[in-house]
Image: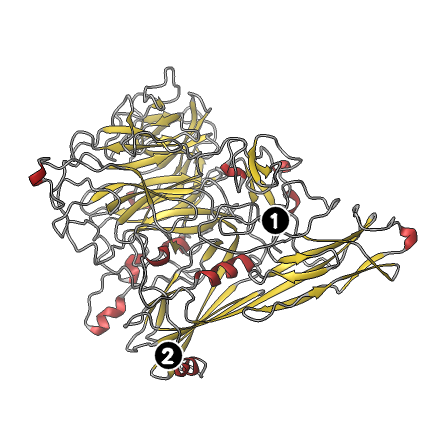
Amino acid sequence: MKLSPTFATVWTVLALAIAAGAAFAGCGSSPGETGALQDGGVGPSDATSRADTGFVFGGSGSGGGSGDASQGLLTLAPLMTTVTVVVGQPVPTVQFTAYVGGVQMGAAWGIDRGELGTINSSGLFTPSGTIGGVGNITVAYGSQTATTTISVVIQATDQGDPDYSASGYDAGTGGYGGVGGNGPGPQPTAAQVTALNGTPVADPTVSILYPYTGTVWPEGLLAPLLQWQQGANNFDSVYIDLKEKNYEFKGYFAANVMPFVNLPIPQAAWDALTFSNDGGGDPVTMTVVFAAGGTAIGPYTETWTVAQATLQGTIYYNSYGTALVKNSDSTDHYGNQYGAGTLAIAPGATSPALVAGVTSLPTNPSPQDAGPNKPANGTGCRVCHTVSADGKSLVTQASNSSASDYTDTVYIDLANDTTMGAGTSLGTKNLAFPAYYKDGTLLLSSSGKMINGDSSSKLYSVPSGTAVAGAQGLPATFQGNVPAFSPDGAHVSFNFWGGSLTAGAGATDAGATDAGAIDAGAPDAAGATLNSDQVSLGILDFDGTSTFSNPRVLYTPAGGNPVVYSSFLPNSAGIVFEIELSNPAGSWGYTWNGNTSQLWWVDVASGMAHGLDQLNGYNAAGNVYLPGNDSNADAGGTVTHPAAQEVMLNYEPTVNPIASGGYAWVVFTSRRMYGNVAQLDPWTSDPRNYPWLDEVTDKKLWVAAVDLNAQPGTDPSHPAFYLPAQELHAGNARGYWSVEACHPDGQSCMTGTQCCGGYCQPGSDGGLICTSEMPSCAGELEKCTQTSDCCGAAQGVSCIGGVCTLSQPPPQ
């Protein structure tokens, strides 16, 4: 079963020509429930089921005649038919016919999924030829309606990537296609195609390095880069088959360069694959066969899941060695100035944009000494940021006086930044990594080990940066390190670094179990003293104005390994957090100097915790599935990424405040290898110490799906994917996920999450605009206060974090 997605912001640049389906009165759709062509995707927002239903009766159609029962029963033919479109060949059509009492009649026709094709007034269905799937064809005659399904199957074949160019590419800062690698493959020779279609032989030294089997992909993402280990072979071509229920792609490609070790999946094929997918019961199978000198080698197979939604919002992250700004007070490996700042990956982008950071003045500003190789005074750096959940503002540290002084905390209005990335100083210094309230009006300061923290954790108004008078529940000695507010604003999590708190009702001490989970221990009595230990994950409730209450310790890791960063799930019922496993140089909370970490989650209600094993790199049997480059030792090379270490290189999680497709989405820093594109020593990321423009650091951002409403004490995560559009040659960290700054009423939109009023509905000209007026029910990704507000409540759509969205993936 597939639920109709809403008008969705998507993370790709697509050009799908999709016709809107015929609309007719009386079929239960609100004004906003029509198909729409998005920035790369389709968004029919009615949340009715797309299950195979045969035909049903009822409703108030607008066909000819009175249509009452005395004329006879309304039926249609054919029933539950399938049409197969072979891309590049004439598009077939299906003629539907309406009958009343067995007599053919003219009637009104419609389809609920306009992206699949159109049906005209005479009942002729014409597939769009770009998207496969199952839709509902409905005919209306008078007071009667009848419905059946239409299944559209797409078959596509490429010989060479349509985007291949012998003259090369301007890959941009994100690398080719936003994912790096050596670019698309040209058309293979006839001999190569013959070899690839032959009977392959197995070679156990060959393996797929990326993507990972079991990955959950969102719709609308930039296509991934397929990367492999070729063993002792010298591949000259590859065949890629991508298959699901309603779509199959067969691609034949010659080598882009030699050695031939990676290839992007063509973007058009990836778009069609993901938007044609039918959810959890429709796995994608990738089969790969290589050829070398006329011999086929393989096959190698992976299975993936496609979430029935696109990702929402913008990711803001720290970049060191960025090419988008120059503000260092030293020179890089090449003797040139480099930059550091906060960048953003917006919907539809293939490269990031600078949002915080300015170019610094040279140390000697005289014209004769201000050449390109001169270092600056280092005062333009803007890093260590936090973003409000509503996407309107950002706070970050600024080196305003010198490169060694990051005491200044600045505010940036993301909707209208008049400071050109410099920011406006808050009234209080040393407020790095605070918990930022959802609307950007308050912050709870971080206090403890992390850089430029407060002397104790306090509540401040933003943008003034002044302490909130009369704040309650924060003792003068309390230190909550790297805190984070929940999306609903009702809780805040933190590393319990200093001071003590008085336990509220239901406070718990977490105790270890022997199965990898952490079970909540006996509750502390109300009024008991909770003492800090610089290790545990603590939580406080918050009233949204000035009072904190009900402190408790949710989880204490075994062995004294501290909790570092934490982030709530969209429903505020769970927390994803980092456990630092080692910091050999004493650099608490960082990703550098050999530090290792893993990510976990905890259920707030029960206090039960468990590792995010699949995200970290373990399979269901507990074995490491991340590839590593241990095989380099066989060829006398250097092993920089032993597989056993890869699972301990995951840091700094932040959860998207908007759930999509029944999943929460976690962005995190990882120093794991990225296939064969990035295999340096994991902690090589300082531009001063290596040729960073010619090599790719492993310090990158990754994204993983996490099941919502998972059983406490179990692993709800899935294997991660590389975040497209991040700067390829820079060291990237601390991704912070937020929605876009909202649009006022009357402005165009694609989802309700883009609108200050919360709803995205058709305007007078039929285009979608923001409005504060609630429709009869809220579509997916529109505002809600309870699940009954949502149109698709009966089909699994829930009100999560104030937004209507799927509460769990479609059933397998």
Quadrant location of the N terminus in the rendered image: bottom right
At 30% from the left and 45% from the top, the residue drawn is: 733
In the rendered image, the vertical position of residue 51 relative to residue 298, given as above or below: above
Q: Pointer 2: what residue? A: 291
Looking at the rendering, which quadrant does residue 168 occupy?
Answer: bottom left
At 89% from the left and 51% from the top, the residue drawn is: 69
Q: Of the residues shown, which amino acid type is indicated by label 1?
A: Gly
In the rendered image, the vertical position of residue 44 relative to residue 240, given as above or below: above
Q: Pointer 1: what residue? A: 35
In the rendered image, the vertical position of residue 339 relative to residue 698, given as above or below: above
Frontmost of labels 2 and 1 is 1
Disc 2 residue crowd, few under 14, some 14–19, many 20+, Cα 10 Å = many
Quadrant location of the C terminus in the rendered image: bottom right
Q: Of the residues shown, which amino acid type is indicated by label 2?
A: Ala
Q: Position of residue 405 (x, y in %)?
A: 17, 31
At 58% from the left and 43% from the top, the residue drawn is: 780
Report whether residue 220 is seen.
yes
